Image (cartoon, grey):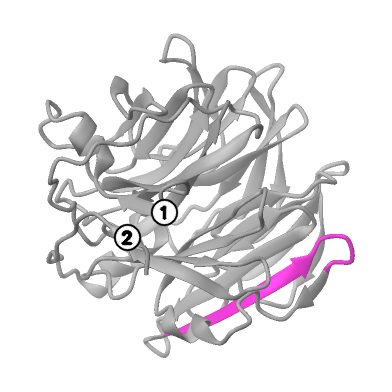
Amino acid sequence: MKKQIWFRKSTTLKWSAWMLLAIIFFTSCRKDAPVDPGVIVPDIKDSSAVNKGTITGLYVLNEGNMGSSKSSLDFYDFEKDTMYLNVFNKANPEIVKGLGDVGNDLGIYGSKLFIVVNNSNKIEVTDAHSVKSLKTIHLNQCRYIAFYKNNAYVTSNDGYVAVIDTAILAITDTIHVGRNPEELVVVGSKLYVANSGGYSPPNYDSTISVIDLNTQKEIKKIPVAINLHRLAADSKGNIYATSRGDYYTTPSALYLVNTTTDRVTKKFGIGASNLAMNGDSLYLYQHEFSMNTGDYETNFSLINTNTLTVGSGFITDGTGKAISTPYGLIVHPQNGNIFITDAKDYVTPGTLFCYSREGKLRWSVRTGDIPSGFAFLYKK
């Protein structure tokens, strides 16, 4: 167990079955922000939008309980082997409600950290190394973020992608896409956006919107599968897309989209809840709730993106059984370490696990509430 600075337990709201299902679809809420004993984030040099230099740390975004403004941001310092909890609130005590309600995604571009807070309808932009707030950008029901040529692109559940100038930190355009868009990924000069339609079951959306980033216009929709969520691109420009299914008769699934033809070329025979790409390997897990059985199924898989073969799970020492609710997933692009979070029962604090590239558990440390998003911090 690595050195940890502080934490405390919290309670969570009880929801009806339908509201719980909606939470699983979109915002996943539970846990709260830890007590701050006065620890300050290490003064680390700013990060680049391009992976270069040495990675010095990992930001972990915690969703927190919906409706309680208990989202939080943690920072794991690789050089000091120390986890610093609740760093946004420490750096910004003047912000009364802290980071806000349901932190959903984050990313670093240049020297700025962009934190997407879904239920607070905002993007908090901070200095990447001090976490000091630079500006709050208001965007209704914002979801996920991607970057391209000095613009940030953020999906909104209202059915569009907002274009944010990363220099002036203002929304300059909106691009209409499908219903309830989720993750998005840039390939070449095109932006691919997963449309879910998850707020209107059983009438789900089933398309990926393709946006020409030179014109900032949607140019087509690719039919894929219902209730799309995650996207990841490999080195050849192929996109891997997850479908959450309908939670009853249609299970989750993984699809391969060729971005040269903009067509689906393969459906993998496995379930998929979250993805992480590193080199020629796609790491994924299935943690799928069935309304029919009232239970979850959990599996870990590793796909060779050259051969498109599905191998055994990326956790090889048997400790994957200790992860009750896998949630966030990312792979260190330099040393191949695998980071996966456990949201546990959505009431108690979460855990960040670090595995070696060989799939052996190296360490684990407590996080804030419902750890889901990540951003690596690079030193110049």
- Where 275 sits versus 160, above or below? below
In this view of the protein, can residue 139 be seen by the observer? no
Look at mark 2 in the image and give the residue it sits on. Answer: 3
Observer-nearest of 373 and 186: 373
Residue drawn at x 32%, y 60% as measured from the top left: 3
Residue 333 appears at what percent x and percent y? 66, 49
Callout 2: helix, strand or loop? strand
Give the amino acid at mark 1: Asp
Find the residue positioned furthest to the bottom.
Answer: 293
Magenta run includes residue 306: yes
Give the amino acid at mark 2: Lys
Callout 1: helix, strand or loop? loop
Residue drawn at x 88%, y 60% as measured from the top left: 306
Residue drawn at x 57%, y 56% as measured from the top left: 228
Residue 297 appears at what percent x and percent y? 49, 84
Look at mark 1 in the image and give the residue it sits on. Answer: 81
Figure quadrant of the C terminus: top right
Figure quadrant of the N terminus: bottom left
Q: Residues within 10 Å of mark 2 (few under 14, many from 20)?
A: some
